[in-house]
Image: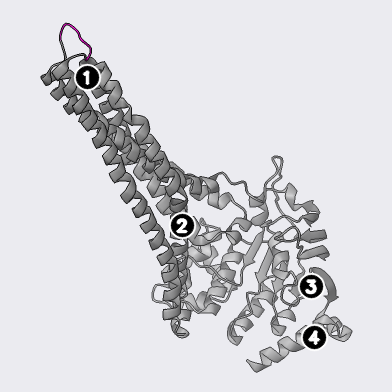
Amino acid sequence: GRRYYTQYVAQLTIFNIRNDLYRKLHELSYSFFEKIDTGQIISRATSDIDRVRRFLGFGLTGLFSSILTFSSVFLILFSLNTELTLISLSITPIIFIITYVYAKKSRPLVMEVRQLVGEIASYSREGILGIRVIKAYNLEKYSYNNFLKINLRRYNIQLNLAKLRAFTWPFLTLVVSLISIFVYWYGGLKVMYGGLEPTENSFKLGDLVAFTVYLGMLIWPIVRLGFITVMAQYAIIAAERFFEIIDMEPGVKEKPNAINLKKIRGEIRFENVVFGYDSNKPILKNLNLEIKPGERIAIVGPTGSGKSTLIKLIPRFYDPIKGRILIDGIDLRDVKIRSLRRHIGLVHQDIFLFPGTIRDNIAYGKPNASMDEIIAAAKAAGIHDFIVSLPKGYNTVIGERGIRLSGGQKQRIAIARALLIDPKIIILDDSTSYLDAETERIIGEVLKKLFKGRTVIIITQRPSTIRLADRIVVLSDGRVVEEGSHEELLKKNGLYAKLYMSWFKEEGDE
């Protein structure tokens, strides 16, 4: 019964911790995931939590058992002979000092092992996801050698821990043996010559034999408590790692009195916005930009000019260091984040598809969408005909990260997903840069016909896509340096004209 109850408490605790950790991960800001390695998150959510589970399930059982055994045997020994009992208990601080020294020396090693577990998980994940690149460039040996370095570091640290254990536990056993020998010797002398608590019933040989038997039952629970202390130390290290995430405050916080953003027109305004991932190194510098409702704009500029950074501020993945961003005249910081993002359809350059069906992926932003709505979104994105040509149609499983689809097909599914939520603002982050001509033509038609009435922001370097915009905004060094139509900017013969000619040449060379 006790063992079941302990396991029940352990499993319930871990169940709640896993839920709390997963919920917290989704509450944290976008910046957290750009800073931390994926493997570190996975190792904390799996192996670290499992280590705590083992302590709660087995360590606590051993703890209760040891305390119960120790208490019972102590009372028996105390009734047999107080002096020998106190002598025997003198080993207790020695055992805990040895255990403390071991825990102190092993702690940094265990922490490094937990860190390396995350690195190994990350590298293994990258090796699997990047297997096509690895094989295409004959990098199998290179990838293996890099993995070997990380694994070798963990191996060496584990050996150091093994050496520490190999010294500690025999030493602990020696101390236990010495105190036992001393009790036998001292008790034997007193039996032979007397003087040990002379009472009406003198301490006899039978009493000494009984005492030594119970002494063994007393000492090993103390030693076991030492083991449990070390086990607890490992569990604490693991718990610190995942509670570090659970206790984190999101970088982007919602005001207590934030309002719901209901129906919007789609006007976006940047007012003197300053932002940088490092506050001492701003990427956007006093940026001012106004986007009218229903306007289609293309944001262009050289690498590092702040294009992708700018669009991360619109869904409040980050907040500006200075200045403000408004939608329909309302500061984004005054709006509930969920209600803000309901109005924004975002299609990233690096398309992520879940390892489910095509239907599930399109409906991800609106799980309760009807099949008619899903088909309408797919038709709008120009992917419906391809889907129905598959044997299982919309129920086709696409594999992890959509590995069974081409780049263009993944792009169109992502656009269908964005369209399904019927957003007033659509952001395409360089999502047409790597498309074939036919796919780009289809998406061009989508932009022309179906994005009417929506505010569309496109980040691209494709001349054919740029020309679909009503207005082009040119960024350089975190500032708007030019804006206007394609023809107007070419006539200015400024930065846009230079960029356009280089892009046009690249497109012509393809």
**Disc 4 secondary structure class:** helix
Dot 2 or dot 3: first in sequence order is 2
Q: Residue at x 61, y 72 (%)?
A: 349
- According to the picture, the residue beneath numbered tag 4 turns out to be 498
Dot 2 or dot 4: first in sequence order is 2
Q: CA distance from mark 2 to mark 3?
A: 37 Å
Q: CA distance from mark 1 to mark 4?
A: 93 Å
Percent of width and height locating residue 116:
45, 60
- According to the picture, the residue beneath numbered tag 3 turns out to be 475
**Disc 2 secondary structure class:** helix
Left or right relative to 422: residue 182: left
Check disc 3: other Cα within 10 Å, few if <14, some if 14-19, many if 20+.
many
Check disc 1: other Cα within 10 Å, few if <14, some if 14-19, many if 20+.
some
- According to the picture, the residue beneath numbered tag 2 turns out to be 42
- According to the picture, the residue beneath numbered tag 1 turns out to be 76
Instruction: Determine whether 145 is above or below 237 in the image.
Output: below
134 in magenta = no
Q: Which dot, 1 or 4, sits closer to the camera? A: 1
Examine the image and state in which quarter residue 322 appears: bottom right
Q: Which mark is residue 508?
A: none
Specify whether residue 399 is in view: no
Specify whether residue 23 is in view: yes
| Residue furthest out toward the top | 200
